[in-house]
Amino acid sequence: MTLSGFGNGHGSLTLLKGFRFDATYVDNAIFKNNQEVQIDLVQAFVGLSSRLGTSVGVTDVSSATDAKALDEAGCTYTSGPLYGAPAAGSVALRLLREGLATAS
């Protein structure tokens, strides 16, 4: 189970501590200042999340440079325009099946 939208509305430290999440997704904008990823802030959040037993995912990642910086800072997951448009579950399953069939 994941907590999406951490830092917005009800996504708070209380939720991180009170519930068991496999991953916490944070919007990329929280880690940006003047369009640059703030590595120290990312690493601090990754450290906190790790102590609480959850991985970190970042949404709305739009550049390979940001994705690399987030990966190097310890983020486990990234999603956003860099990787393509969101897909419905049925479409994602079909694409995975087609990919597996092609790889065989």
Image (cartoon, rainbow, N blue to C red):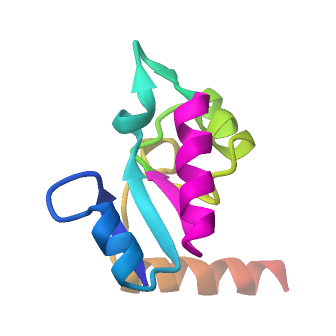
- Main SS of the magenta part reads helix
Work out whether 47 lies above or below 97.
above
Q: Nearer the viewer, residue 87 or 76?
A: 76
Label tally:
0
Q: Residue at x 42, y 60 (%)?
A: 25
Left or right for 69, reference 58 = right
Work out whether 34 lies above or below 71.
above
Locate residue 91, reporting x and y percent: 41, 79
Q: Please report the bounds of the magenta region as a residue range.
A: 39-58
Residue 52 is one of the magenta-drawn residues: yes
Work out whether 58 lies above or below 3.
above
Work out whether 89 lies above or below 76.
below
Residue 100 is one of the magenta-drawn residues: no
Q: Residue at x 43, y 17 (%)?
A: 35
Locate residue 37, reporting x and y percent: 53, 26
Residue sitting farthest toward the right: 104
Residue sitting farthest toward the top: 34
Residue sitting farthest toward the left: 9
Image quarter of residue 70: top right
Q: Nearer the viewer, residue 60 or 6?
A: 6
Q: Nearer the viewer, residue 96 or 50?
A: 50
Q: Residue at x 14, y 57 (%)?
A: 9
Locate residue 20, reporting x and y percent: 45, 85
Locate residue 29, reporting x and y percent: 35, 34
Q: Which quadrant of the figure contains the N terminus?
A: bottom left
Q: Which quadrant of the figure contains the C terminus?
A: bottom right
